[in-house]
Image (spheres, helix red, strand yellow):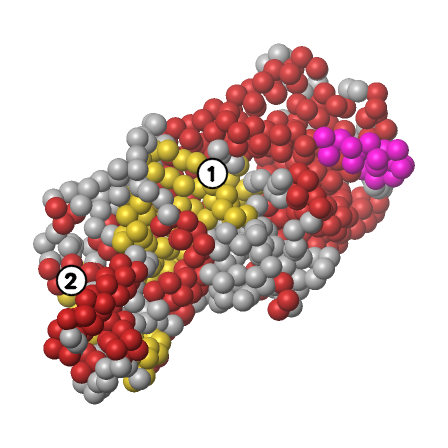
């Protein structure tokens, strides 16, 4: 193993080579799986529909041509995410012969923000786009999809998670409206030909009424207008599947339609499904028996039943259950086929999942597959014409994510051989600490376990606090969304507890007479040392970004696993990232000082580091596991003890940053490089994935010049 050591230049080069192999091998493996070994074509796209670029990826079977007319499904992410968290839905739909688009809403990822959208939302309403009540670019993406020659515009479906659920609902309501096809045809007779109707007559067949009431010339003109209207109606979004937002998905469907001068109540003219987690913060169970929900679903006094296909009858204000979601098929059940054709089908599904697990779930993915296979009549062929669905449990996306994770860890471990190489250069010598770490021969195990237990307890408390204090108010300086609040509160809170523990360690050591202060932490390395540390950490983060962009260029893959990710950024977001980096450096210096204050010398270095990382992380893991099991195993508990809605990534970032702080200190005898690097990579993760789509950031000089 002497050939693979961080203590020599040759050893660093060999380890770096292995890391690079892991990066590109992981990305290649992920791409291989996602393309189904070359059977699926995946391309990044940029749409500029209203003076701002909308970014995403399109997935479709390789070999598709303009002679094909394939159904399409578009997916939208939630707050604090980009399309990357939803693209596995597109992978699975493309494997079944669909065209699928994963879209980053305006202001998320590298999508820009227009001055205004089609509903008039824009930069002048204060805090930016009212992202929960606008289409946020999703309708622009739908219109783009309709323009594709290989897409069947009569079979388009949309889905979104959380905020994306609200966006998808708003998009469906804006695109489809509340008028049935017959309502629209009745209005042609009313508006164009002056025909009047009783309230009972507006429910009669408009075409038959036209034949009875119009002369030959009028009828010919009516039929022309009716054909136009029918084509328009049939090319509206056919099916919508909001995920992880029970309240709005179940309630906000009834609207008012004006038909021949009468105001009538109608459901949105789209087939609707909704998938929620039983442990979701949106309290799905309560909504299922909420009076407003039941009114929308026409169930009367009965609760909405899950996993059942409903058929809506808006005229009579009733609904009917026609069968089980998992077994009913349009191939064998004409009632379901007719309901879908008439845009009156609804289904509510609930899985034993939390809010954020909803978009990283094989079960929810299976539900999405089944819903769109039925509502869009396709699975590598028309189901109604005998095509046999692939099977909703036949999924590969989770395997591909393992490749992304391998590449991610390859990138993270790459920093250590690079650090070893930089540390050998003269320029970086001021960043190397002058005082060596004391090697204490005797270990006070009682003291060690007391502080270890305190670390676990404090980590639990800080994580719980961070998960209850999510909000960080948007401002011109801190202009990421509120979802970075948990991360900020966790880091700052942990630093406060670490300061207490560090003070305790110093006091106990002085009391024991061994004189171990803080000199060996080399905090006071001078301006040159701090400057060299900043350059060192910046070079490392630049190398990581270069590795990312190389994977993006070669394989269109980034570094991610669930909510643990770093990805591409707009140029303006680098400045946002640096703002947050500044506030993290001092907390990470304190955390690093506590982590590295003393080392056990009665065990191998690798084992001692492993124990350090484990005990620093087990509090987060234990709280997360307890919260889930407490709700999952207790039927009377539907809310998580500690809601990890925006902090599941702590399960990964805590051990990663702990190890980085420890290893970089061992290599440089200096806390600054590790603290600065951790601040940079956490800020990068926040800025690249959370984005600023709840706060308006106008397009500027930098994005225009650099085209990113």
Is residue 318 at least partly visible in the picture? no
Circle 1 sits on which residue? Answer: 44
Residue closest to the eye, 355 or 292: 292
Q: Find the distance from the CA under tag 2 to the CA under tag 1.
A: 36 Å
Image location of residue 123, percent across then percent down: 63, 63
> Mark 2 touching mark 1, by CB under 8 A?
no
**Res 30 → quadrant:** top left
Q: Is residue 634 left or right of residue 207?
A: right
Q: Is residue 151 left or right of residue 377?
A: right
- Residue at x 44% of width, y 41% of height: 57
Question: Magenta span covers which residues?
Answer: 521-539
Q: Which mark is residue 132?
A: none
Sequence-wise, which precedes: disc 2 or disc 1? 1
Image location of residue 316, percent across then percent down: 20, 81
Whether 39 is drawn above or below 79: the answer is above
| 10 Å crowding of disc 1: few (<14), some (14-19), many (20+) | few
Q: Which mark is residue 338?
A: 2
> The residue tagged with tag 1: helix, strand or loop?
strand
> The residue tagged with tag 2: helix, strand or loop?
helix
- Residue at x 43% of width, y 51% of height: 141
- Residue at x 28% of width, y 48% of height: 152
| 10 Å crowding of disc 2: few (<14), some (14-19), many (20+) | some
- Quadrant of the drawing holding the C terminus: top right
- Residue at x 53% of width, y 61% of height: 117
Residue closest to the eye, 509 or 71: 71
Is residue 229 at least partly visible in the picture? yes
């Amino acid at each position: 193993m002497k050939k693979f050591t961080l203590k020599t230049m040759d050893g660093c080069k060999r380890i770096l080579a292995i890391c690079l192999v892991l990066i590109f091998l992981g990305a290649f493996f992920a791409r291989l799986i996602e393309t189904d070994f070359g059977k699926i074509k995946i391309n990044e796209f940029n749409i500029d529909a209203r003076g701002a670029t909308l970014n995403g990826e399109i997935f479709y079977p390789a070999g598709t041509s303009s002679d094909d007319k394939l159904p399409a499904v578009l997916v939208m992410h939630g707050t604090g995410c980009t399309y990357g968290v939803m693209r596995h839905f597109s992978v699975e739909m493309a494997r079944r012969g669909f065209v699928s688009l994963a879209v980053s809403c305006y202001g998320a990822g590298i999508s820009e923000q227009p001055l205004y959208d089609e509903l008039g939302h824009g930069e002048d309403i204060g805090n930016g786009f009212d992202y929960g009540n606008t289409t946020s670019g999703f309708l622009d993406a739908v219109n783009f999809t309709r323009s594709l020659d290989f897409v069947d515009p009569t079979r388009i479906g949309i889905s979104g998670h959380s905020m994306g659920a609200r966006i998808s609902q708003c998009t469906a309501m804006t695109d489809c409206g509340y008028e049935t096809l017959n309502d629209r045809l009745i209005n042609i007779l009313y508006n164009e030909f002056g025909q009047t109707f009783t309230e009972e007559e507006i429910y009669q067949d408009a075409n038959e009424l036209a034949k009875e009431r119009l002369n030959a010339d009028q009828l010919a003109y009516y039929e022309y207008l009716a054909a136009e209207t029918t084509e328009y109606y049939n090319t509206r979004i056919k099916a919508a599947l909001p995920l992880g937002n029970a309240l709005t998905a179940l309630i906000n469907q009834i609207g008012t339609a004006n038909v021949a001068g009468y105001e009538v109540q109608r459901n949105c003219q789209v087939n609707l499904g909704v998938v929620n987690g039983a442990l979701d913060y949106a309290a799905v169970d309560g909504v299922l028996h909420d009076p407003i929900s039941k009114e929308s679903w026409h169930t009367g006094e009965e609760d909405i039943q899950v996993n059942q296909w409903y058929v809506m009858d808006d005229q009579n204000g009733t609904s009917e259950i026609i069968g089980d979601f998992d077994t009913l098929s349009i191939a064998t059940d004409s009632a379901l086929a007719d309901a879908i054709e008439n845009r009156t089908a609804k289904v509510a599904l609930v899985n034993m999942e939390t809010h954020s697990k909803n978009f990283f779930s094989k079960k929810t993915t299976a539900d999405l597959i089944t819903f769109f296979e039925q509502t869009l009549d396709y699975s590598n062929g028309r189901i109604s014409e005998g095509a046999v669905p692939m099977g909703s449990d036949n999924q590969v996306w989770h395997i591909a994510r393992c490749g992304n994770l391998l590449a991610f860890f390859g990138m993270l471990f790459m920093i250590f051989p690079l650090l070893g190489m930089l540390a050998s250069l003269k320029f970086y010598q001021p960043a190397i600490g002058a005082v060596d770490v004391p090697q204490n021969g005797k270990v006070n195990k009682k003291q060690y376990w007391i502080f270890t237990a305190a670390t676990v307890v404090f980590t639990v408390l800080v994580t719980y606090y961070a998960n209850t204090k999510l909000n960080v108010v948007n401002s011109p300086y801190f202009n990421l969304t509120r979802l970075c609040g948990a991360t900020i509160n966790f880091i700052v809170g942990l630093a406060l507890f670490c300061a207490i523990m560090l003070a305790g360690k110093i006091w106990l050591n002085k009391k024991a007479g061994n004189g171990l202060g803080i000199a060996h932490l080399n905090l006071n390395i001078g301006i040159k040392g701090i400057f060299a540390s900043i350059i060192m950490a910046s070079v490392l983060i630049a190398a990581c970004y270069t590795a990312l962009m190389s994977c993006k260029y070669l394989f269109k893959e980034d570094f991610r696993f669930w909510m643990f990710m770093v990805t591409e950024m707009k140029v303006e977001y680098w400045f946002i990232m640096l703002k947050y980096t500044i506030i993290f450096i001092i907390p990470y210096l304190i955390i690093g000082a506590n982590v590295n204050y003393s080392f056990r010398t009665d065990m191998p270095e690798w084992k001692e580091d492993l124990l350090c990382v484990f005990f620093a992380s087990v509090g987060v893991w234990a709280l997360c596991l307890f919260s889930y099991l407490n709700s999952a195993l207790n039927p009377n508990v539907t809310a998580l003890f500690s809601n990890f809605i925006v902090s599941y990534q702590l399960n990964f970032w805590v051990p990663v940053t702990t190890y980085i702080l420890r290893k970089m200190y061992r290599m440089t005898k200096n806390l600054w490089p590790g603290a600065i690097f951790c601040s940079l990579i956490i800020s990068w993760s926040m800025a690249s994935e959370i984005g600023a789509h709840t706060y308006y950031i106008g397009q500027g000089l930098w994005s225009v010049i650099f085209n990113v």
